[in-house]
Amino acid sequence: MSDYAALARDLKETLGLKHEPVAITLIKKGSALPSDYPVTEAPVRHCGTIMRARKGEKLLVTPEKEACPVGASALGMVPVPEKVASGEFHANMGMYKDPAAAKNTLELRTSFPLGDVIGVAASPLDKATLVPDVVVLTALPEQVFWLIPAAQTYEEGGRVSVEMAAVQASCVDATIIPIVKGKTNISLGCFGCRKTTDIMAEEMLVGIPFKNFEKIVGAVKTMGAGAIPKSRAKSL
């Protein structure tokens, strides 16, 4: 088992992160809910779950405690509401020209089958007692920048593609895509998380599949001994 506290410390110190890396484990159908992750008392959105965990809280969110049916349906915890599926919900928010555009976005999102996930366990990485599926960071653009070479180009070179939308930054872009597609993904945030959480205007999100996390932290540490301080020193 990896040393979660050491990995979290190394990443925070090297990049200068303000908030704790968040470990997310999806509890799948047929599995027992973990007893050491307290079930949240009040309903919470997935983006709110991440923001609470980045401040040190450990929590478990079950389907009936998911406050956002859009995120919960992407996670496979509840059915997709009709107004969401039709595009009416997001079009009424003013995020799309019409329901057809919003519907197209929802149909293209990566998601889990209904009933596949029965709980979301979240905690700061250094407090995790479950093996994470994904580690989610909220960070500044310059800090996120260093994760691009660390996740892919440091060893392989080439260019990087990211996948995002104007909605579902925390649930789809930073959680589901990294898990399902096995790649680090970046999001600029979305209407929902920016409206309902304390994420700052200058912050963005990154989701890192845990299977790649230790290797990525190692690359960040290597760059932290050379490339990162050189860049931050600037030469104007």
Image (cartoon, rainbow, N blue to C red):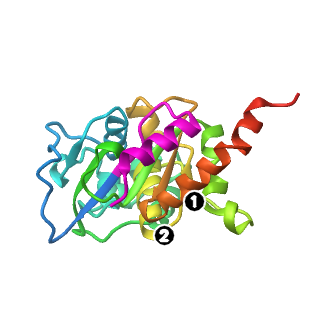
| Image coords of residue 69 (percent x, y) | 29, 51
| Numbered disc in front, either 1 or 2 | 2
Graded by Cα atoms within 10 Å as few (under 14), some (14 to 19) or many (20 or more), the crowding at tag 1 reads some
Q: Tell me the quarter of the image containing the N terminus.
A: bottom left
Three-letter code, disc 2:
Lys
Three-letter code, disc 1:
Glu
Q: Which mark is residue 181?
A: 2
Q: Are marks 1 and 2 in contact (CB under 8 Å)?
A: yes
Q: Is residue 197 left or right of residue 187?
A: left
Gap between marks 1 and 2 measured at Cα = 11 Å
Q: Is residue 108 above or below residue 7?
A: below
Q: Tell me the quarter of the image containing the C terminus.
A: top right
Instruction: Give, as a single range, the part of the protein colored magenta.
Output: 1-23
Residue 128 drawn in magenta: no
Mark positioned earlier in the residue sequence (1 or 2): 1
Picture residue at 61% right of the left edge, 40% below the top: 143
Mark 2 lies on a secondary structure that is: helix
| Image coords of residue 184 (percent x, y) | 54, 59
Q: Which mark is residue 163?
A: 1
Q: Is residue 145 left or right of residue 168?
A: right
Mark 1 lies on a secondary structure that is: loop
Residue 3 drawn in magenta: yes
